[in-house]
Amino acid sequence: MGMEWPPAPTPALQLQRKAAAVVGSALKLLLFVILAGLAVRLLAGPAAYLLPPTAAPDEAARLVAAPGRGRTGGGGGTPPSEANDLIFDVTGSGPLTAPDKKEDSPGESCNLFHGEWVPHSSGPAYTNASCRFIESPQNCMTNGRPDTDYLYWRWKPYGCDIPLFDSKKFLDGMRGKHWALIGDSILRNHVQSLLCLVSKVEDATEVYHDSTFKSRRWHFPSHNFTVSLIWAPFLVKAKIFEDDDGVSTADLQLHLDVLETNWTSQWESFDHVVISTGQWFFKTAVYWENGAEIGCHSCQNKNLKEMAPEYSFRKALSAAFRFIVSSPHKPGVFYRTWTPAHFENGEWFSGGTCNRTSPFKPGEAGDRESDNKMWRIEREEFDKAMANKAPNGNADHLKLLDTFELSLLRPDGHPGPYRTYHPYEKGMTAKVQNDCLHWCLPGPIDAWNDIIMQMLAKD
């Protein structure tokens, strides 16, 4: 079909335009007089009127975010009105929109982990267009997620404000350092966020990966800064017999009193560590201690004692904390707490979905008995590690990165069906697997790095 041209104006329309032109000229003259008077006042007035010159911004690659639209499947809440038609600077110099008003900086009395998500008009610090480290299952924008409102929130503790992650300041402070993120696929999700933020200043080079690409390492040569991702979903020794789709050919074998050597053997090379474990403990597994089977969780061998996953979770945490506290090498360690899933109307294996498009407000998350139980175990074992130091041990380097509350309040931040590329391309009735555990990138998980940087600043 050919291009349609606008119709030629009628004589009456031409007369209207001439009249409008006369009025427009008069308005321009009036505006010129007002501006001239203001200029004379500024030049002749006191020094208080003088403003420092503003440096011209560098030429920036820009990405326009589409107006917020409803996510497939519905979901609730009122999105922030500022979320429409914003422009991002994706070259590293920050948002092009006006900064938020200044609030109190976090003090010693401010709990960084207790607060709410508030509208954030500037949007994310990076996008799918500016960061190459986002893996496909978390690349919600590229995969066709239609709504964008989930990008326009920031975490705000009650009584204080957390500055956004400063990539340059972080890299400058980490010259010659080695960071390790140890745990399961949520840590892999986290390391992508960190790489996206830091690569705004310097791009990273991958220098190692194992055969499965689950353990990897990146280097920032100009800063001699290294980031390692170490796959250890249980932290303790585990024999795993499942593929990437979660299909198992045999029961997991967990040695609850033996730590996984792929992270303990490298411990002395780390300057900072983020370590965690979590949802894997709900899987069917056989438990071992002192080289012998002691029981299992939902296993096929009915001769073994049935044991709750809370038991194995507690034992693994106890072993990991004992090692961290008693080791002569003392890197700065952040233990990141439990990450809740947000499946509704089922679980991941039974058609569960997550179609919400805005955060929960405090109190809206409902009863989370299982999540709260695991979170409580973590805090109990952490407190034991801090109080009951091993002989000659020291726990001052161990910190709790308690992201449970801020994660619980973000049911809208998961890929959902958009873990795969355009899942509804062949129709909205397609049966689609949802991911309601991991996080879209950019997304809520970026706030974890804001908090880490603030905790580093406090130290």
Image (cartoon, rainbow, N blue to C red):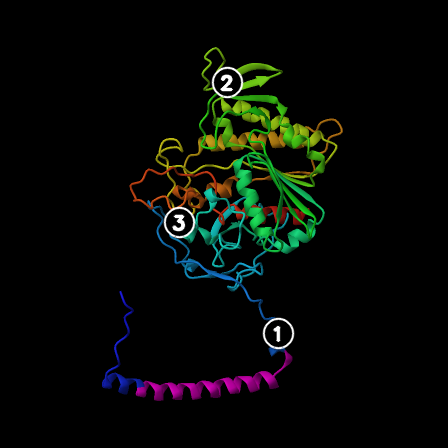
Q: Residue at x 48, y 49 (%)?
A: 117
**Range drawn in magenta:** 18-47
Q: Is residue 286 left or right of residue 179?
A: left
Mark 2 or mark 3, earlier in chain: 3
Q: CA distance from mark 2 to mark 3?
A: 41 Å
Name which residue lies at 69% across and 49% down: 174
Q: Residue furthest front?
A: 2
Verify CB contact (< 8 Å) between mark 1 and mark 3: no
Q: Label 3 crowding class (10 Å Cα cut-off): few <14, some 14-19, many 20+?
A: some
Note whether 18 is above or below 310 in the view shown.
below
Residue flagged by tag 1: what amino acid is it? Pro
Q: Please state the horizontal and vertical placement of residue 402, each as a whole percent of the image.
A: 56, 40
Q: Is residue 359 above or below residue 434?
A: below
Q: Percent from the top left, x then y, of residue 23?
A: 35, 87
* Three-letter code for the amino acid on which mark 3 is drawn: Gly
39 or 249: nearer the viewer = 249
Q: Secondary structure at mark 1?
A: loop
Q: Which mark is residue 426?
A: none
Residue 44: x %, y % from top left: 61, 86
Residue named by callout 2: 296
N-term-proximal mark, 1 vs 3: 1
Of 155 and 361, the residue lying toward us: 155
Q: Which residue is mark 3?
A: 144
- Residue carrying label 1: 53
The answer to whether the residues at label 2 and label 3 have Cβ atoms under 8 Å apart is no
Q: How many marks?
A: 3
Residue 25 in the magenta stretch? The answer is: yes
Please state the horizontal and vertical placement of residue 333, each as a whole percent of the image.
Answer: 65, 38
Q: Nearer the viewer, mark 1 or mark 3?
A: 3
Q: Check the image and report above or below for 131 versus 409.
A: below
Q: Main secondary structure of the magenta part?
A: helix
- Rate crowding at label 2 as few (under 14), some (14 to 19) or many (20 or more) other CA atoms within 10 Å: many
